Amino acid sequence: MDVDSESIIKIVFPNGIKDEWRNNPDFLQYIARLGSMNLEQLNKEPERLTEDKGAVLSQTQDLAFSNYKTFIRTAECSRDIFEKLNKSEKSLESLLTGLPSLSVTCQEFVRSSSDINVHRRLNSLTLTRNAQLLEILELPQLMDTCIRSGNYEDALELAAYVRRLGKKHNKIPIIANVACEVENAWLSMLQQLLSTLRTDLPLPSVLQIVGYLRRMELFSEAELRLKFLQCRDSWLQALLAAVPKDDASQHLSRTVELSRVHLFSIITQYRAVFGDSEADISHNSSSYNTLFYAWIMEKVMQFLSTLEQDLAQGVGPSLDSVVRQCMYFGQSLSRVGADFRGLLAPIFVKALQQSIEVSIVKATRKFEQDMENFTLPKKVSPIARSFGSMQDSHEEHPPETLLEFRPLADYCNAVLMCFNDIRLCAPVALAAKATSLLQESLCSVARCMLAFYRQEQQALTLPEKEAFTRFCSCMADHLLPFLQRCLHIVFPPTIIATHLGVNVHRLQKEHIMFLDRSSILDPISHLLPVKVELPSLQSLNIEDTPPETSEENTSTNFPNMEASSKRVELEEAISDTTTESATVPEAEVLPPPASTIPENSLSAQEEAS
């Protein structure tokens, strides 16, 4: 559009024209035509336009009248076309809206179809490799079968193969699942091996099992040693717990035997399995040895605790056997550097001391109870009549005069039973204590006799007073020297003197291992007959015997007995008779072995009171 046309437009249309008119060529052509007209033409132009408009309108009306059917059809077609165009436009809009989802769906279809194709190929490959896959799937079951049947070597190889397979194909789920199941079976194999270690095993089996545990690589060296000791200790504790505890003697004997055999076996197995080389000993073996010896120390202390408990309950005459067993036990462990015999002495000394105390106290109480029901004999017994002209020809036998007085006989039996229980294992450390206990007991006996006399003296007849005098004389002249002799046989003065570094006369002078006769008889000294000379135990002449001749017995010379010293032969066992009847048994003599104390010197023979 040129400048003239713009000027004409501004003149004709001062308010501006529509934009689409500017692009209409007919409009621009008409504007150019207006610009080329003169004034007269311009004045006539409205009329011409009006005429042209009327002519066009008339022609249009004529055309409409002549072709109205065509116009109707055209209008209908236009309306149909418009409606269809609108519908098509809406369909196109919905199509445009659905095209992205269609594209995504198509992509998913392509992807799923590709996956299906991959699975199809995998299934085809799986079908061709069915045998190999079946072998892999059966690995956990095969592992479990090997473990159950005890084929640990094959189980270790299978586990190693599965681990390599799992590391190589850890992203494959089925391989990961197989590896997990084999790992669980691997742990069950560990528990089975440890359970086997808790049973009675010979050394080759122990070596084999520990070798398997090492190859499993689940424990460090220290952990493996600790686990070995725990398992073997669990088995040992189960054996010890199964020992019946009804009889303390049998329980202790069986415990010593089991502990000695199996503890030594465990130590031997440990040293065979974990034998440290010279390089290990010089570098890192100290912690391992600490662990090992700490375990041995725990077992020794546990055994000593059991020993103390059973000894506290009392083991009776089998104490010497227990001592020998325990000493042999300690000696066997000395070969592995665990000799604990030095720890046994205080325990046995304590147990023996308690045994002596209990026995002596029981004997004293029994004498006091017997004195409550004691009746002095009114007639002189045949033994008392013949005693004046008869002396004991067997110093190892209890005096037969004790048969006349039942309380003294029972008391003598009780003391002899106490000595017999400890005679084979009497420790030197208890010599002074045993002497002191016996001294106190005899003093109590004398006081009890005095109390009996004071209580009954008003009612005593002359024969009963004479019988009581014999009673006191029997206690002073026969029971007391006999118990002194028995005490010296259990604790020989020569051995005590050797340990103390003095001679026997010094022991006698210091009242060591010798009963204080004057102190014991002081309560009843005024009741003893005047014609009876009261010998002093300090005046006893005891022949020194060299300590190295310990197998021979020491002879002791008492007043009013044979002056020459001779070997004392004591009977090994004489039946104990403590019946409820009022009978007094007489001595039953058996061939006695050397260095023994008569347990009971009374047998069944009735005496009239």
Image (spheres, rainbow, N blue to C red):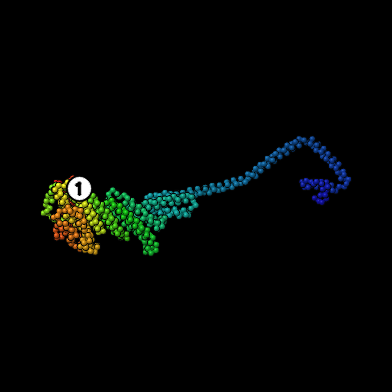
Q: Is residue 145 above or below residue 332?
A: above
Tell me the residue at 29%/52% (across/down): 312
- Nearer to me, 502 or 523: 523
- Nearer to me, 563 or 206: 563
Residue 155 position in % (x across, y down): 40, 53
Residue 493 position in % (x across, y down): 21, 60
Question: In the rendered structure, which amino acid carries the disc numbered 1?
Answer: Gln
Residue at which label 1 appears: 455
Tell me the residue at 62%/46% (across/down): 100
199 with respect to 606 (left or right)? right
143 with respect to 367 (left or right)? right
Question: How many circles with numbers are drawn on the protein?
Answer: 1
Q: Is residue 429 above or below residue 126?
A: below
> Regarding mark 1 in the picture, which secondary structure is present there?
helix
The answer to whether residue 340 is seen in the rendering is: yes
- Nearer to me, 92 or 370: 370
Residue 280 position in % (x across, y down): 38, 62
Mark 1 residue crowding within 10 angstroms, few (<14) / some (14–19) / many (20+)? few
Quadrant housing residue 261: bottom left
Tell me the residue at 81%/36% (across/down): 62
The residue lying furthest to the right in this view is 40
Quadrant housing residue 437: bottom left
410 with respect to 284 (left or right)? left
Residue 254 position in % (x across, y down): 28, 52
Tell me the residue at 31%/57% (across/down): 264
The answer to whether residue 131 is seen in the rendering is: no
